[in-house]
Image (cartoon, rainbow, N blue to C red):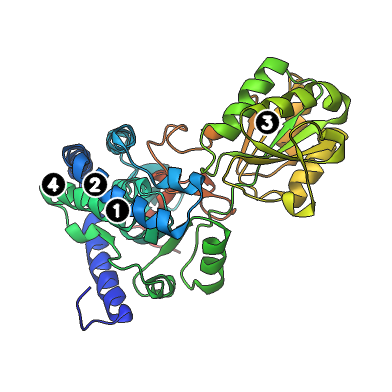
Amino acid sequence: MKDAQTIPEMMTEIGKRAKAAAAELGYATAECKHAALIGAADAVWANRAQIIEANAQDMDYARNKGLSPAMMDRLMLDEARIQAIVDGLRAVAEQPDPVGEVLAEWDMPSGIHIRRVRTPLGVIGVIYESRPNVTADAGALCLKSGNAVILRGGSESFHSSRAIHACLVEGLRSAGLPEDAVQLVPTRDRAAVSELLTMTDYVDVIVPRGGKGLVGLVQREARVPVFAHLEGIVHIYVDKAADPVKALNVLLNAKTRRTGICGAAECLLVHQDIAATLGKELISALVQAGVEVRADPALAGPGTVPANEDDWGREYLDMIIAARQVADVDGAIAHIRKYGSNHTDCILTEDDATAERFFERLDSAILMRNTSTQFADGGEFGMGAEIGIATGKMHARGPVGAEQLTSFKYLVDGAGAVRS
């Protein structure tokens, strides 16, 4: 940011540059985009020491702000996580290029031939909080889908995001693509977010990725269309026909593998017929694993704390889970409809009819059976990475990968056809 430049001036300049880059990127070859992503991956690995050093500055900043252990875990980068960033960039690079794909084509009696073809959205604004890997994921997916992107990372990940962004720019440069195709807002000032949300002349869609406060702000203030990534209020319902071994393994993984991600389980629902048996065993295992279980009276036991109304419909992003007894699958469905966020919900059962009822009557973006909810992730869905989990119903839903960042246009050919 130039010294004399105001936030609105800075954001307008970024928007103009992004729009110009999008026009060029929209017809970039698949080979060029592939080369840019591989170049970015190589740069991330080559600069891993500098990225970890930048991340250490962010960790200090976050520690001084008093971030929770789960939030610190979201922020932290080590060599293994940088390897995962590199792998994600390479995975996106190797995917088929979605731009120009013919989705459908047909002939009409009038003599015209019509094709519906994938096309980029244009300029995407991505607003995210403390996870610096989103810088790479969002940049890669937007580039792959032919979109320019304006990235606005969280204040905690400021230095890490800048270091990763520099690697993306290096990849663009090496492939001869416009460096303005991936821009990072160079300030922690929240005013930049408000500007980005109203830049209808330059930005085609906003993707917020963060907590309820961020998403609420975006939905209130945005004049640009939004792909909402709401809270991950993730439920696991343990049916009376659940396999005890599967239930234990899945539940512990879903809650404890990484508590700070949106696919982490936040509420356990247990069929009343097994509440005193398997239900209590599962809760005991959670307590032994260090999870604070906020249980209703039917599931209360050694080490639990009483749940209150505020515990239902809450995203903890921490070693905390709410637990409640329900009468049956319909009771679980009713609870999830009332308190869920339409993100990811799971049933543990060996009964096919019960599982089908759960799948049919809930409308979450992702529904799972006998599977850890930690798989609610674009990378695990074979998308290489994701820009977020869209919980709305318009355009994109579930993990948002490169395909979901495209629209389409109709291409019509004729041989001098005229309409009568």
Residue 321 shown left or right of residue 156 in the figure: right
Mark 3 vs mark 1, CA separation in Å: 34 Å
**Circle nearer the N terminus (3, 2):** 2
Residue type highlighted by circle 4: Ala
Residue type highlighted by circle 3: Val
Q: Which mark is residue 53?
A: 2
Which residue is labeled 1 in the image? Answer: 57
**Circle nearer the N terminus (3, 4):** 4
Mark 2 vs mark 4, CA separation in Å: 27 Å
**Image point 75% across, 48% down: which residue?**
337
Contact? badges 2 and 1 (CB < 8 Å): yes
Instruction: Give the SS element for disc 1.
Output: helix
> Callout 2: 10 Å neighbours few (<14), some, many (20+)?
some
Which residue is labeled 3 in the image? Answer: 287
Q: Nearer the viewer, residue 273 or 79?
A: 79
**Image point 42% across, 32% down: which residue?**
382
Name the quadrant of the N terminus: bottom left
Q: Position of residue 264 (x, y in %)?
A: 57, 39
Mark 3 vs mark 4, CA separation in Å: 52 Å
- Relative to 185, say whether 368 is above or below: above
Residue type highlighted by circle 1: Gln
Q: Nearer the viewer, residue 379 or 204?
A: 379
Residue 171 shown left or right of residue 225 in the figure: left
Which residue is labeled 4 in the image? Answer: 175
Residue type highlighted by circle 2: Glu
Question: Tag count in the figure?
Answer: 4
